[in-house]
Image (tube, rainbow, N blue to C red):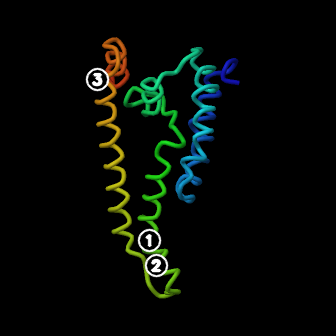
């Protein structure tokens, strides 16, 4: 499908398929090794068909994982962050898990603490993406770095 309908394949992948893997990554510890085969299929079959390219190098693959606002395509690697996502899920649900184990039917979970933890996780993700992108820019060709910068620039039009 990626060869004949690249936009439809890209949309199905980014808006559907990769979100299905989020549940698996968050709930099954140590799943990253099993997701390596899926990443190999994405890298060696899907991306070459989508991009009409034969070889996807490590730097190009990493660039494609970034969201479009950072100059990528948002095609995440299922194996790459699986362990971190599982740990984040465990941390977010720990207070509820403790209440279930203790059979505490009267206690309430602290929603403010959970919200703060979610914000911290989001900030950490953004920070890691920014650091990773800056490191990657150092390894890419100047022309590619300019293209990334162009993709990141937001143009605002004033309508009078």
Question: Does residue 103 appear in the picture of this structure?
Answer: yes
Relative vertical location of residue 21 with respect to residue 105 in this rendering, above or below: above
Return the residue at label 1: 94
The answer to whether marks 3 and 2 mark residues whose Cβ atoms lie closer than 8 Å is no
The foreground one among 126 and 115 is: 126
Can residue 157 be seen in the rendering of this structure? no
Q: Residue at x 54, y 48 (%)?
A: 32
The numbered mark at residue 98 is 2
Instruction: Check if mark 1's residue and mark 2's residue have beta carbons within 8 Å.
Output: yes
Q: Position of residue 125 (x, y in %)?
A: 36, 46
Q: Give left or right: position of 116 versus 107.
A: left
Tell me how far mark 3 sits from mark 2, CA to CA: 45 Å
At mark 3, the secondary structure is helix
Q: Disc 3 vs disc 1: which is toward the camera?
A: 3
- Horizontal and vertical percent for residue 138? 28, 23
Identified at 34% across, 27% down, the residue is 136
Question: In the rendering, at what x and y percent does residue 13 appear?
Answer: 61, 35
**Residue that protrudes farthest toward the top in the picture:** 143
> Which comes sooner in the sequence, label 3 or label 2?
2
User: Crowding at label 3, few (<14), some or many (≥20) Cα neighbours within 10 Å?
Assistant: few
Indicate the quadrant containing the N terminus: top left, top right, bottom left or bottom right. Answer: top right
Residue at left offset 66%, top offset 23%: 2
Which image quarter holds the C terminus? Answer: top left
Left or right? Give the position of 138 relative to 96.
left
At x 36% / y 50%, what residue is drawn? 122
Q: Name above or below for residue 1 compared with residue 95.
A: above
Q: Position of residue 31 (x, y in %)?
A: 57, 52
> In 3D space, how far apart are the residues under numbered discs 1 and 2 (Cα atoms)?
6 Å
On the rendered structure, is 138 left or right of 66?
A: left
């Amino acid at each position: 499908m990626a060869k004949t309908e690249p936009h439809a394949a890209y949309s199905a992948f980014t808006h559907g398929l990769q979100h299905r893997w989020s549940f698996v990554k968050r709930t099954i510890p140590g799943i990253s090794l099993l997701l390596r085969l899926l990443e190999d299929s994405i890298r060696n079959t899907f991306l070459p068909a989508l991009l009409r390219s034969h070889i996807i190098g490590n730097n190009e693959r990493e660039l494609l994982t970034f969201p479009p606002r950072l100059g990528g395509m948002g095609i995440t690697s299922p194996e790459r962050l699986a362990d971190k996502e599982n740990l984040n899920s465990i941390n977010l649900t720990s207070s509820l898990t403790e209440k279930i184990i203790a059979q505490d039917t009267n206690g309430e979970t602290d929603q403010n603490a959970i919200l703060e933890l979610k914000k911290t996780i989001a900030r950490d993700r953004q920070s890691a993406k920014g650091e990773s992108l800056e490191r990657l820019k150092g390894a890419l060709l100047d022309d590619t770095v300019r293209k990334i910068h162009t993709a990141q620039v937001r143009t605002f039009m004033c309508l009078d």
